[in-house]
Image (cartoon, grey):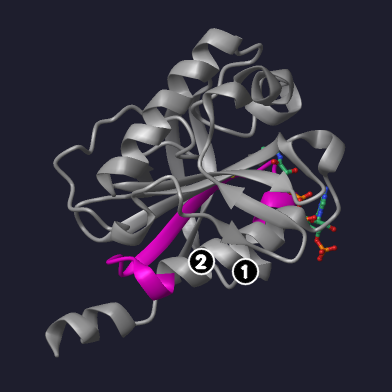
Amino acid sequence: MFAIPTAIDPTASELSHATTAAFFDIARDEVFRLETKRMWLRWPHHTDAANIASWAGLAEVADMTATWPIDVTDTNVRQRIATARAENSSGTAMRFVMVNKDQPTYAMGQIGIVGHANGTGHVGYHLDPACNGLGLMTEALTRVVEIAGHVSGLTQLDAGVRLINPASRRVLEKCGFVHVGQGISTSAFRGDMPVDQFEHLLPQRRRLAWAA
Ligand SMILES: CC(C)(COP(=O)(O)OP(=O)(O)OC[C@H]1O[C@@H](n2cnc3c(N)ncnc32)[C@H](O)[C@@H]1OP(=O)(O)O)[C@@H](O)C(=O)NCCC(=O)NCCS
């Protein structure tokens, strides 16, 4: 067992990596968005706050994360959105809201990668439970991993999943993450939590281009 200093999900961390290199240059402007078969993955908007708070603070959702409190307030989500947008601008993170193409103003989930100085990106996500079981997170994460491999300066991704969260573990496995062990994630809201740890190596494409 080893300690995992980072949060289980990066959708709400503080802007603590301001000195980290910009890993996501192409994603630093709000115009950047990703398309999947059913969804747009776009920057979070300030107007998403009440919508996200309505499901992110449910116990069944928040308890699976390290950084979200149960009953999170609209005000707190607004602050998190401001932080997420600042991190996207700095290129240290790539955080998206997941919206259905048919319902583009309804933020049904969030997914993101936070880059760290050692070149590892920490992955996190959460979804409105009304949308569970439709393959949406697998669809979103597949695209996010693909784009991280193409345009980021990261060498690998990692993720931590509570042992009581087989659905999230399955999502990671379906997206090519490999189980590498167990550790402890320390959460301000949940204390010390045993987690399964996963990794995904990224292709060398961008680094080779830089070297050329
Ligand atoms: C976990 C979560 C992301 C899953 O999102 P989703 O869109 O429902 O996931 P998908 O439909 O893409 O895939 C879920 C997979 O888990 C499986 N699954 C669901 N519940 C399961 C369970 N109790 N045991 C085992 N597998 C389970 C599904 O069958 C599916 O696998 P399959 O395609 O092989 O059948 C979502 O429920 C969520 O956000 N939960 C709360 C927050 C959270 O857990 N965040 C992640 C923190 S690490």
Q: Are marks 1 and 2 in contact (CB under 8 Å)?
A: yes
Q: Residue at x 76, y 34 (%)?
A: 128
Res 164 label: none
Q: Quadrant of the C terminus?
A: bottom left
Q: Which residues are magenta?
A: 149-169
In this view, the residue in front, 87 or 31, is 31
The percent coordinates of residue 132 (x first, y second) are 83, 44
Q: CA distance from mark 1 to mark 2?
A: 8 Å
Q: Left or right of 104: which side holds 189? A: left
The percent coordinates of residue 131 (x first, y second) are 83, 42
Res 175 label: 1
Res 145 label: 2
**Marks 1 and 2: which is nearer the front?**
2
Q: Residue at x 42, y 73 (%)?
A: 149
Circle 2: element type:
helix
Circle 1: element type:
loop
